[in-house]
Amino acid sequence: MNETRTFALGWSGGSGIAYGMRLLEVLLAGGHTVHLVASPAALRVLRHEAGVELDPARPDLAGLVRPELRARLHVHDPAAVEAAPSSGSAAIAAVILCPCSMGTLARVAHGFSSNLLERAADVALKEGRPLIVVPRETPLSPLHLRNMLSLAESGAVVLPAMPGFYHRPQSVQDLVDFVVAKVLDRLGVASPLIRRWATPPAPPASPWHEGEEP
Ligand SMILES: Cc1cc2nc3c(=O)[nH]c(=O)nc-3n(C[C@H](O)[C@H](O)[C@H](O)COP(=O)(O)O)c2cc1C
C-alpha cells in the first residue's frame, strides 16, 4: 500500500523509546501524517534512554524530527482529550502505542481512556480500526499476559518489542529497525528497513572446535 494516510502514535513510558522515535521518522518520511502523543513517563524515558531533556510543561516533540518532516506532524498534550485522535469521526487510519508500558496496556485493556493515548486506542477498538501495541517488559506477570490477551481478543495487534536475530544485526539500530519494520508491515506501509527472509544465508563458522564444546 503506497498511499499516504494519517496515524496516531502514542509513546508511553515503556523502555524502547528508540522504537517510537524511529517509527515516527519513517512514517513522516513516507509522506504520512502523524498525530503524536507522549505520556509524562515517556518524556522521562526519553531523557534516560535518548538523553533528550524536554520541558515537561511544554515538551517540544516536533523538535525531535527533521524540519522538513514537521509539516505533517501534530503533537498533542496527553490531557487534550478534545484533540482529533479522541474522536471516531476523525480520519485516523490506525493507532500505534510504541513503546507501550504495562500501565498503559492495562488501562487500554480495561477501557479507562484516562488520557489521549488511551482514548485514541479505545476509539480504534470501537471503530474496528487497527490498534497496534508494542509492549516491553520482562518477565511478564499473569496480569500482563491477561491484559495482552484481552487486547488481542478485542482486536488489537499485540506486537512485543522482541527483535529477531536471524537477520544478523550489526548494531542496535538494526534491532530497532527489525521491530519497527514489523509494525510497518502490520500497517501496510512499505518498509525500507529490513531485508526480507528468502534463502537462509550460510551459517557462520562455528566458534567451537571439535571436542571442545563446553
Ligand atoms: C527508564 C525507564 C524505563 C522503563 N521501562 C519500562 C518498561 O520497559 N515497561 C514498563 O511497563 N514500564 C517501564 N517503566 C515504568 C513506566 O514508565 C511507569 O510504569 C509509568 O507509570 C508508565 O506510565 P504511562 O503508561 O502513562 O506511560 C520505565 C520507566 C523508566 C523511567
Image: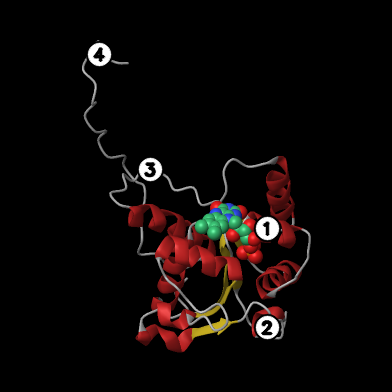
Instruction: Kindly tell me whether mark 1's CB lies below 8 Å from ligand 1.
Output: yes
Measuring 47% from the left and 78% from the top, which residue is drawn there?
3
- Residues at marks 3 and 4 touching, judged by CB atoms closer than 8 Å: no
Q: Position of residue 73 (x, y in %)?
A: 49, 83
Query: In front: 1, or 34?
Result: 34
Mark-to-mark CA distance, 3 and 2? 39 Å
Measuring 75% from the left and 71% from the top, which residue is drawn there?
114
From the image, state whether disc 3 or disc 1 is nearer to you: 1
Q: Residue at label 4? A: 212
Mark-to-mark CA distance, 2 and 4? 62 Å
Of the numbered discs 2 and 4, the one sitting upstream in the chain is 2
Give, as a three-letter code, the residue at label 1.
Gly
Relative to 204, is 68 on the left or the right? right
Mark-to-mark CA distance, 4 and 1? 47 Å
From the image, state whether disc 3 or disc 2 is nearer to you: 2
From the image, state whether disc 3 or disc 4 is nearer to you: 4
Relative to 71, is 139 on the left or the right? right
Q: Residue at label 2? A: 80
Query: In front: 173, or 205?
Result: 173
Of the numbered discs 4 and 1, the one sitting upstream in the chain is 1
Of the numbered discs 2 and 1, the one sitting upstream in the chain is 2
Residue 165: mark in rendering? 3
Mark-to-mark CA distance, 2 and 1? 19 Å
Give, as a three-letter code, the residue at label 2.
Ala
Q: Residue at label 1? A: 103
- Residues at marks 3 and 2 touching, judged by CB atoms closer than 8 Å: no
Q: Position of residue 176 (x, y in %)?
A: 40, 56
